[in-house]
């Protein structure tokens, strides 16, 4: 049976951390190789809050496939025409934000997975490895197995429904959007709050019960992130390209100005 490698899925299935990096500012395809060499497992190609075009996303996806890092695109909620075109052109997963109910999660699967799991249209093959050599049956099976379908839980309603969402066949990851969730709970930016920890505990337990993976988004404080990893979160967004560049640039200018 032909398989398509997804480094993030492989790490998750091995019980390891699947580390992602947000790509919001960069447009050059070299970012895929750079982040792979840096040790990341997946790219979080942000088309929800960033200005990245579908074309730029597709080009980075193609480069990521060759670099051995999984390209995963976040699209605006409900924008399935963008999501499926990203998948057609190299993405190995889609992040759908603001999913609150099992019915919404079921729609995500219907739109993003090929039959018999969902109802995604078969529209020819993009840059995915060797798909041109496969039968349609083998190709759709390989892509369904490789692609990560990720839903973001960003409200108390979503957390309350975590068990039902995790139970939907075809959903792979429940990723908590910590910024939006904290804002909705009236504790914006308070990532160490016990109420947020309770939300993580609820989601992680739901994922464990239904054989899904739980994720962390929006928390980069090194004093706080380990708390949620130790609780069981494994799909971890580790930072963004712009913040990494700014941190390195500030460190360099600070060093140089202190040489006098």
Image (spheres, grey):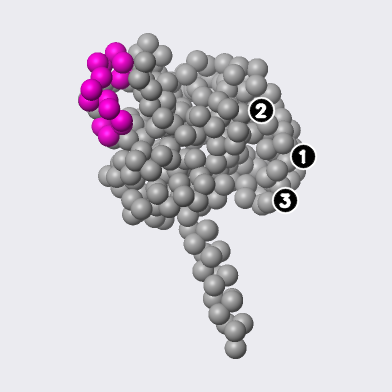
Which quadrant of the structure image shows residue 54?
A: top left
Dot placed on the residue nearer the N-terminal end, 1 or 2: 1
Part of the protein shown in magenta:
126-140
Residue at mark 1 to residue at mark 3: CA–CA distance: 15 Å
Q: Is residue 37 above or below residue 196?
A: below
Q: Position of residue 1 (x, y in %)?
A: 36, 15
Would you name the residue on which mark 3 appears? 223
Q: Residue at x 24, y 16 (%)?
A: 135
Furthest-top residue in this view: 116
Which quarter shows the C terminus?
bottom right
Q: Which mark is residue 194?
A: 1
Name the secondary structure under disc 3: loop
Q: Residues within 10 Å of mark 1 (few under 14, many from 20)?
A: few
Q: Is residue 161 visible?
A: no
Sequence-wise, which precedes: disc 3 or disc 2? 2
In the picture, measured across the screen, residue 168 lies left or right of residue 156, that is left
Which residue was labeled with disc 2? Answer: 204
Circle number at residue 147: none
Q: Secondary structure at mark 2?
A: helix
Outermost bottom residue: 260
- Which residue occupies the foreground of this view, 204 or 4? 4
């Amino acid at each position: 049976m032909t398989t398509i490698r997804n480094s993030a899925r492989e790490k998750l299935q091995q019980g390891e951390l699947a580390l992602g990096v947000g790509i919001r500012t960069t447009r050059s395809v070299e970012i895929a190789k750079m982040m792979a060499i840096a040790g990341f497992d997946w790219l979080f190609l942000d088309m929800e809050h960033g200005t990245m075009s579908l074309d730029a996303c597709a080009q980075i996806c193609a480069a990521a496939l060759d670099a051995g890092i999984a390209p995963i695109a976040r699209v605006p909620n409900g924008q399935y025409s963008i999501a499926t075109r990203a998948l057609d052109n190299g993405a190995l997963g889609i992040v759908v934000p603001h999913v609150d109910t099992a019915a919404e999660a079921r729609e995500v699967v219907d739109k993003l997975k090929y039959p018999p799991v969902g109802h995604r249209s078969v529209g020819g093959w993009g840059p995915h490895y060797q798909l041109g050599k496969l039968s349609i049956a083998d190709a759709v099976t390989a892509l369904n197995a490789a692609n990560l379908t990720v839903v973001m839980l960003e409200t108390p309603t979503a957390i309350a429904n975590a068990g039902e969402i995790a139970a939907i066949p075809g959903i792979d990851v429940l990723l908590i959007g910590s910024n939006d969730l904290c804002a909705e709970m009236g504790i914006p930016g308070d990532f160490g709050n016990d109420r947020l920890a309770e939300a993580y505990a609820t989601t992680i337990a739901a994922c464990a019960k239904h054989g899904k993976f739980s994720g962390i988004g929006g928390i980069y404080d090194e004093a706080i992130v380990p708390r949620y990893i130790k609780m069981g979160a494994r799909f971890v967004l580790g930072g963004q390209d712009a913040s990494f560049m700014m941190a390195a640039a500030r460190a360099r200018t600070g060093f140089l100005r202190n040489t006098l």
